[in-house]
Image: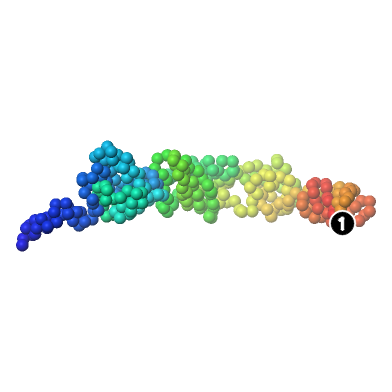
Amino acid sequence: MSPRSSGREWRRLLGPIAFFAFIQQILGVQSAHAQQFPVSLRVRTSSTVTGARVTIDDIATVESSDQREDGRAVSVKQVVLIDGLEPGGTRQLTAYQILDRLRGESIEPATIGYAIPEQITVRRVGREITKGELQSLLDDYMKGTGREASIRTFSHDGSTRLFAGSATLRVVSLERQRVGLSRIVIEATSESGESAQIQVVGQLDEFMFVPVASRPLSVGKVVTPSDLVMARLDMSRIPRDVAAQSEGVVGHTIKRGVGVGDLFRAPDLILPQDVTSGSSVTLRYVGRGFKATASGSALEAGRVGGTIRVRNDASKRVVEGTVIEPGLVEVR
Protein backbone atom coordinates (compact mmCIF):
# COMPACT_ATOMS: atom_id res chain seq x y z
CA MET A 1 0.00 0.00 0.00
CA SER A 2 1.42 3.40 -1.00
CA PRO A 3 1.84 6.22 1.62
CA ARG A 4 -0.91 8.25 -0.10
CA SER A 5 -3.40 5.36 -0.07
CA SER A 6 -2.34 4.61 3.52
CA GLY A 7 -3.33 8.17 4.55
CA ARG A 8 -6.72 7.81 2.85
CA GLU A 9 -7.24 4.56 4.73
CA TRP A 10 -6.51 6.27 8.11
CA ARG A 11 -8.99 9.06 7.33
CA ARG A 12 -11.62 6.48 6.32
CA LEU A 13 -11.13 4.44 9.52
CA LEU A 14 -10.90 7.36 11.95
CA GLY A 15 -13.40 9.70 10.36
CA PRO A 16 -12.65 13.34 9.57
CA ILE A 17 -13.03 14.66 13.16
CA ALA A 18 -11.02 11.89 14.77
CA PHE A 19 -8.32 12.22 12.12
CA PHE A 20 -8.08 16.00 12.90
CA ALA A 21 -7.65 15.23 16.61
CA PHE A 22 -4.99 12.62 15.78
CA ILE A 23 -2.98 15.22 13.83
CA GLN A 24 -3.38 17.73 16.71
CA GLN A 25 -1.87 15.21 19.13
CA ILE A 26 1.08 14.63 16.81
CA LEU A 27 1.65 18.40 16.63
CA GLY A 28 1.51 18.75 20.42
CA VAL A 29 -1.83 20.57 20.67
CA GLN A 30 -4.69 19.70 23.03
CA SER A 31 -7.87 20.27 21.05
CA ALA A 32 -11.61 19.86 21.45
CA HIS A 33 -12.61 21.13 17.99
CA ALA A 34 -13.13 24.77 19.01
CA GLN A 35 -15.22 25.48 15.92
CA GLN A 36 -17.99 23.07 17.04
CA PHE A 37 -18.81 24.78 20.37
CA PRO A 38 -20.56 28.08 21.16
CA VAL A 39 -17.58 29.05 23.37
CA SER A 40 -14.10 28.56 21.92
CA LEU A 41 -10.67 28.93 23.51
CA ARG A 42 -7.46 29.25 21.49
CA VAL A 43 -4.26 29.60 23.52
CA ARG A 44 -1.12 31.17 22.07
CA THR A 45 2.25 29.41 22.41
CA SER A 46 3.80 32.50 24.01
CA SER A 47 2.43 35.69 25.53
CA THR A 48 3.79 38.85 27.13
CA VAL A 49 1.87 40.34 30.05
CA THR A 50 2.19 43.47 32.20
CA GLY A 51 0.73 42.37 35.54
CA ALA A 52 1.57 39.88 38.26
CA ARG A 53 -1.75 38.05 37.86
CA VAL A 54 -2.17 36.17 34.59
CA THR A 55 -5.60 35.06 33.39
CA ILE A 56 -6.71 33.05 30.38
CA ASP A 57 -7.70 36.34 28.74
CA ASP A 58 -4.02 37.40 28.83
CA ILE A 59 -2.75 34.40 26.84
CA ALA A 60 -5.67 33.28 24.69
CA THR A 61 -8.52 34.28 22.44
CA VAL A 62 -11.93 33.40 23.88
CA GLU A 63 -14.95 33.79 21.60
CA SER A 64 -18.65 33.13 21.83
CA SER A 65 -20.78 32.37 18.78
CA ASP A 66 -24.01 32.57 20.78
CA GLN A 67 -25.03 35.61 22.85
CA ARG A 68 -26.56 33.26 25.40
CA GLU A 69 -23.04 31.92 26.09
CA ASP A 70 -21.37 35.34 26.53
CA GLY A 71 -21.43 35.00 30.33
CA ARG A 72 -19.61 31.67 30.19
CA ALA A 73 -17.04 33.15 27.80
CA VAL A 74 -16.36 35.91 30.33
CA SER A 75 -15.97 33.28 33.08
CA VAL A 76 -13.40 31.44 30.97
CA LYS A 77 -11.45 34.66 30.38
CA GLN A 78 -11.29 35.41 34.12
CA VAL A 79 -9.74 32.08 35.15
CA VAL A 80 -6.44 32.85 36.94
CA LEU A 81 -3.44 30.81 35.77
CA ILE A 82 -0.54 32.56 37.53
CA ASP A 83 -0.56 34.79 40.60
CA GLY A 84 2.67 36.59 41.50
CA LEU A 85 4.69 36.72 38.29
CA GLU A 86 7.59 39.06 39.03
CA PRO A 87 8.61 41.87 36.63
CA GLY A 88 10.91 40.46 33.96
CA GLY A 89 10.00 36.92 35.01
CA THR A 90 9.04 33.94 32.84
CA ARG A 91 6.77 31.01 33.61
CA GLN A 92 5.95 27.85 31.69
CA LEU A 93 2.43 26.43 31.56
CA THR A 94 1.18 23.15 30.16
CA ALA A 95 -2.12 22.35 28.46
CA TYR A 96 -2.96 20.02 31.34
CA GLN A 97 -2.48 22.82 33.89
CA ILE A 98 -4.86 25.07 31.99
CA LEU A 99 -7.49 22.36 31.73
CA ASP A 100 -7.14 21.67 35.46
CA ARG A 101 -7.61 25.37 36.25
CA LEU A 102 -10.79 25.40 34.17
CA ARG A 103 -12.11 22.44 36.12
CA GLY A 104 -11.14 24.17 39.36
CA GLU A 105 -13.46 27.02 38.40
CA SER A 106 -16.29 24.57 37.63
CA ILE A 107 -15.85 24.95 33.88
CA GLU A 108 -15.81 21.49 32.32
CA PRO A 109 -13.41 21.52 29.32
CA ALA A 110 -15.65 19.00 27.52
CA THR A 111 -18.34 21.70 27.26
CA ILE A 112 -16.19 24.22 25.38
CA GLY A 113 -14.03 24.09 22.30
CA TYR A 114 -10.32 24.54 22.83
CA ALA A 115 -6.96 24.40 21.10
CA ILE A 116 -4.08 24.52 23.60
CA PRO A 117 -0.36 23.97 22.87
CA GLU A 118 1.34 21.43 25.11
CA GLN A 119 3.78 24.10 26.36
CA ILE A 120 3.02 27.80 26.80
CA THR A 121 5.56 30.50 27.72
CA VAL A 122 4.38 33.56 29.66
CA ARG A 123 6.70 36.54 30.13
CA ARG A 124 6.09 39.66 32.18
CA VAL A 125 7.59 42.89 30.92
CA GLY A 126 9.94 44.76 33.25
CA ARG A 127 12.72 47.28 33.13
CA GLU A 128 15.95 47.95 34.96
CA ILE A 129 16.47 51.01 37.13
CA THR A 130 18.55 53.72 35.45
CA LYS A 131 21.60 55.47 36.85
CA GLY A 132 19.73 58.78 36.79
CA GLU A 133 16.84 57.35 38.79
CA LEU A 134 19.19 55.87 41.36
CA GLN A 135 21.10 59.14 41.74
CA SER A 136 17.84 61.05 42.28
CA LEU A 137 16.72 58.52 44.89
CA LEU A 138 20.04 58.80 46.73
CA ASP A 139 19.82 62.60 46.71
CA ASP A 140 16.40 62.43 48.36
CA TYR A 141 17.59 59.82 50.85
CA MET A 142 20.63 61.90 51.84
CA LYS A 143 18.68 65.11 52.49
CA GLY A 144 19.07 66.25 56.06
CA THR A 145 21.86 63.75 56.83
CA GLY A 146 24.80 66.02 56.02
CA ARG A 147 25.96 63.45 53.47
CA GLU A 148 26.18 63.33 49.70
CA ALA A 149 26.78 60.46 47.30
CA SER A 150 27.70 60.33 43.63
CA ILE A 151 27.26 57.03 41.78
CA ARG A 152 30.16 55.77 39.72
CA THR A 153 28.82 52.33 38.79
CA PHE A 154 26.11 50.00 40.05
CA SER A 155 24.88 46.50 39.37
CA HIS A 156 22.22 44.03 40.48
CA ASP A 157 21.60 40.35 39.84
CA GLY A 158 18.61 41.02 37.57
CA SER A 159 16.35 38.71 39.59
CA THR A 160 14.02 41.59 40.34
CA ARG A 161 13.24 44.37 37.93
CA LEU A 162 10.98 47.39 38.02
CA PHE A 163 7.39 47.27 36.89
CA ALA A 164 6.71 48.47 33.38
CA GLY A 165 5.21 51.93 33.38
CA SER A 166 5.29 54.39 36.25
CA ALA A 167 6.19 53.37 39.80
CA THR A 168 6.96 55.12 43.06
CA LEU A 169 10.52 54.47 44.19
CA ARG A 170 12.28 55.10 47.49
CA VAL A 171 15.52 54.03 49.15
CA VAL A 172 14.79 51.83 52.16
CA SER A 173 18.36 51.45 53.38
CA LEU A 174 21.94 52.27 52.43
CA GLU A 175 24.56 50.02 53.97
CA ARG A 176 28.27 50.63 53.53
CA GLN A 177 29.96 47.29 52.88
CA ARG A 178 33.36 48.92 52.67
CA VAL A 179 34.72 52.31 51.69
CA GLY A 180 33.23 53.31 48.35
CA LEU A 181 30.97 50.25 48.04
CA SER A 182 27.42 50.23 49.36
CA ARG A 183 24.36 47.99 49.22
CA ILE A 184 21.22 49.94 48.41
CA VAL A 185 17.74 48.51 48.98
CA ILE A 186 15.01 50.17 46.90
CA GLU A 187 11.27 49.70 47.31
CA ALA A 188 9.09 50.07 44.22
CA THR A 189 5.31 50.49 44.32
CA SER A 190 3.22 50.29 41.16
CA GLU A 191 0.09 52.31 40.45
CA SER A 192 -1.99 49.24 41.33
CA GLY A 193 -0.34 49.01 44.75
CA GLU A 194 1.97 46.07 43.97
CA SER A 195 5.33 46.39 45.71
CA ALA A 196 8.75 44.83 45.30
CA GLN A 197 12.28 45.39 46.54
CA ILE A 198 15.44 45.68 44.47
CA GLN A 199 18.94 45.30 45.89
CA VAL A 200 21.65 47.25 44.12
CA VAL A 201 25.39 47.24 44.81
CA GLY A 202 26.90 50.59 43.91
CA GLN A 203 30.34 52.14 43.83
CA LEU A 204 29.79 55.54 45.39
CA ASP A 205 31.84 58.66 45.92
CA GLU A 206 30.45 59.68 49.32
CA PHE A 207 30.90 63.07 50.92
CA MET A 208 30.04 64.33 54.36
CA PHE A 209 30.17 67.65 56.20
CA VAL A 210 32.17 67.22 59.41
CA PRO A 211 33.63 69.67 61.95
CA VAL A 212 37.32 70.56 61.65
CA ALA A 213 39.44 72.93 63.74
CA SER A 214 39.37 76.57 62.59
CA ARG A 215 42.50 77.38 64.65
CA PRO A 216 45.20 75.50 66.55
CA LEU A 217 43.84 74.13 69.83
CA SER A 218 46.15 73.27 72.71
CA VAL A 219 45.79 70.61 75.38
CA GLY A 220 43.21 71.54 78.03
CA LYS A 221 41.26 73.92 75.77
CA VAL A 222 37.48 73.59 75.98
CA VAL A 223 36.13 73.68 72.44
CA THR A 224 33.72 76.52 71.62
CA PRO A 225 31.59 76.98 68.45
CA SER A 226 34.12 79.48 67.07
CA ASP A 227 36.88 76.86 67.29
CA LEU A 228 35.47 74.81 64.43
CA VAL A 229 34.08 75.01 60.90
CA MET A 230 32.21 72.44 58.81
CA ALA A 231 34.14 70.96 55.89
CA ARG A 232 32.93 68.76 53.01
CA LEU A 233 35.18 65.71 52.88
CA ASP A 234 35.38 62.43 51.00
CA MET A 235 34.14 59.75 53.42
CA SER A 236 36.97 57.46 52.34
CA ARG A 237 39.31 59.92 54.13
CA ILE A 238 37.28 60.04 57.35
CA PRO A 239 38.34 57.61 60.11
CA ARG A 240 35.57 55.79 61.96
CA ASP A 241 36.31 57.49 65.30
CA VAL A 242 35.77 61.04 63.99
CA ALA A 243 33.11 63.26 65.57
CA ALA A 244 30.62 63.76 62.73
CA GLN A 245 28.52 66.51 64.38
CA SER A 246 29.52 69.77 66.04
CA GLU A 247 27.46 68.74 69.08
CA GLY A 248 29.97 65.97 69.61
CA VAL A 249 32.84 68.46 69.82
CA VAL A 250 31.67 71.70 71.44
CA GLY A 251 32.17 71.61 75.21
CA HIS A 252 34.74 68.83 75.04
CA THR A 253 38.27 69.33 76.34
CA ILE A 254 41.25 68.90 74.03
CA LYS A 255 43.36 65.95 75.17
CA ARG A 256 45.95 66.13 72.39
CA GLY A 257 46.86 69.19 70.34
CA VAL A 258 44.78 69.82 67.21
CA GLY A 259 46.00 71.81 64.17
CA VAL A 260 44.09 74.01 61.73
CA GLY A 261 41.84 71.86 59.51
CA ASP A 262 42.34 68.75 61.62
CA LEU A 263 39.44 66.40 62.29
CA PHE A 264 38.26 65.89 65.86
CA ARG A 265 38.84 62.27 66.76
CA ALA A 266 37.67 60.49 69.91
CA PRO A 267 41.21 59.99 71.34
CA ASP A 268 41.79 63.78 71.05
CA LEU A 269 38.79 64.75 73.20
CA ILE A 270 37.66 64.44 76.78
CA LEU A 271 33.93 64.37 77.34
CA PRO A 272 32.60 67.44 79.15
CA GLN A 273 31.76 66.78 82.79
CA ASP A 274 28.45 67.79 84.33
CA VAL A 275 30.20 68.04 87.70
CA THR A 276 33.87 69.02 87.94
CA SER A 277 36.24 67.99 90.70
CA GLY A 278 36.34 70.57 93.53
CA SER A 279 33.08 72.27 92.51
CA SER A 280 30.29 73.03 94.99
CA VAL A 281 27.27 70.77 94.71
CA THR A 282 23.94 70.21 96.40
CA LEU A 283 23.66 66.86 98.16
CA ARG A 284 20.16 65.38 98.09
CA TYR A 285 19.74 62.64 100.68
CA VAL A 286 16.95 60.17 99.94
CA GLY A 287 15.96 57.39 102.33
CA ARG A 288 12.91 55.44 103.38
CA GLY A 289 10.35 58.07 104.39
CA PHE A 290 12.62 61.12 104.27
CA LYS A 291 14.44 63.57 102.00
CA ALA A 292 17.02 66.19 102.97
CA THR A 293 19.52 68.47 101.26
CA ALA A 294 22.93 69.78 102.25
CA SER A 295 25.86 71.62 100.74
CA GLY A 296 28.85 69.64 99.60
CA SER A 297 31.92 69.48 97.41
CA ALA A 298 32.69 67.13 94.53
CA LEU A 299 35.88 65.15 95.01
CA GLU A 300 35.66 63.73 91.48
CA ALA A 301 34.35 64.81 88.10
CA GLY A 302 31.39 63.02 86.64
CA ARG A 303 28.59 63.03 84.10
CA VAL A 304 24.84 62.64 84.59
CA GLY A 305 24.13 59.07 85.69
CA GLY A 306 27.67 58.46 86.91
CA THR A 307 28.78 57.83 90.48
CA ILE A 308 31.28 60.18 92.19
CA ARG A 309 32.64 60.80 95.68
CA VAL A 310 31.39 63.93 97.48
CA ARG A 311 32.04 65.50 100.89
CA ASN A 312 29.37 66.99 103.15
CA ASP A 313 30.61 70.50 104.01
CA ALA A 314 29.02 70.42 107.48
CA SER A 315 29.90 66.92 108.67
CA LYS A 316 33.02 66.50 106.50
CA ARG A 317 31.80 62.98 105.80
CA VAL A 318 32.76 61.52 102.41
CA VAL A 319 30.06 59.49 100.61
CA GLU A 320 29.26 58.32 97.09
CA GLY A 321 26.36 59.70 95.11
CA THR A 322 24.83 59.77 91.64
CA VAL A 323 25.03 62.85 89.42
CA ILE A 324 21.40 63.81 88.69
CA GLU A 325 22.12 67.04 86.84
CA PRO A 326 24.90 69.65 86.83
CA GLY A 327 25.45 70.70 90.47
CA LEU A 328 23.09 68.07 91.99
CA VAL A 329 24.22 64.74 93.49
CA GLU A 330 21.81 62.26 95.06
CA VAL A 331 22.94 60.16 98.05
CA ARG A 332 21.01 57.09 99.12
Classify the position of the N terminus by image quarter.
bottom left
Q: Would you say residue 151 is visible in this rendering? A: no
* Residue 138 drawn at (x, y percent): 51, 44
- Badge 1, how many Cα within 10 Å: few under 14, some, many 20+? few
| Quadrant in the rendering for residue 307 | bottom right
- The single residue placed furthest to the bottom in the displayed view is 1
In this rendering, position of residue 325 left or right of residue 106? right
In percent of the image, x 8 and y 56: which residue is there?
Answer: 8
Residue 320: x and y in percent read 84, 56
Identify the residue at the far top of this view.
67
Question: What residue would you read off at disc 1?
Answer: 319
Number of disc labels: 1
Viewer-proximal residue, 85 or 114?
A: 114
- The residue closer to the viewer here, 20 or 236, is 20
Q: Nearer the viewer, residue 142 or 186?
A: 186
Q: Residue furthest right?
A: 314
Which corner quadrant holds the C terminus?
bottom right
Judged left or right of residue 296, residue 225 is left
Query: Residue 30 vs residue 105: left or right?
Result: left
Counting from the top left corner in percent of width and height, residue 124 is at 36, 47
x 71%, y 51%: residue: 269
Amino acid carrying mark 1 in the image: Val
Q: Is residue 109 visible?
A: yes
Which residue: 32% across, 45% down?
76
Where 151 sits versus 10, above or below? above
Q: Residue at x 50, y 49 (%)?
A: 185
Q: Is residue 193 above or below residue 317?
A: above
Residue 6 pos. (x, y %): 8, 59
Mark 1 element type: strand
The image's colour scheme reads rainbow
Q: Would you say 36 lies left or right of 153 here? A: left
